[in-house]
Amino acid sequence: MKEPEETITLIDEEGVERDFTLVDIIEVDGCEYAIILPVNDEEEDEAVVLRFAQDEEGNDLLIDIEDDEEWEKVVDTWEEMISR
């Protein structure tokens, strides 16, 4: 399901636009997650993991994972995939 080095722009809580490189899209327990890396943030080189969701109008959203168990499951799946 990997997209080739696509750049996406997200707006943070303060309304600031930030660019990210889409590294991969994975599925865990029926949900899809985006693995992204900041484009212009030299201090932050860790991947960010966000879950795909939809708003009331059916628009796609990327949201933070707030559940620790869900987070661990997604990270474990991603680490297993990249270690192959």
Image: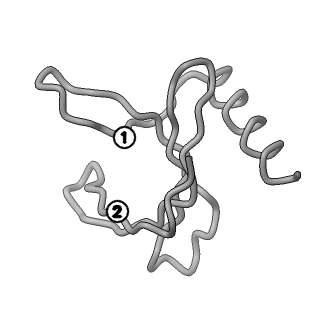
Q: Which residue is mark 2?
A: 8
SS under mark 1: strand
Q: Amino acid at mark 1?
A: Leu
Label 2: which secondary element: strand
Q: Residue shown at 34%/62% (left/top)?
A: 8
Residue under label 1, please give it: 62
Q: Is residue 40 left or right of residue 53?
A: right
Q: Quadrant of residue 26?
A: top right
* Most foreground residue, 34 or 71: 34
Give above or below for 38 relative to 68. below
* Distance CA(mark 2)–CA(mark 1): 11 Å
Residue farthest to the left? Answer: 57
Q: Residue at x 30, y 63 (%)?
A: 9
Image x and y of residue 33, in percent: 52, 38
Residue at 51% across, 66% down: 4
Residue at left 19%, top 34%? Answer: 59
x%, y% of residue 62?
36, 40
Nearer to us in this view, 5 or 19: 5
Instruction: Identify which amino acid the numbered label 2 is placed on.
Output: Ile
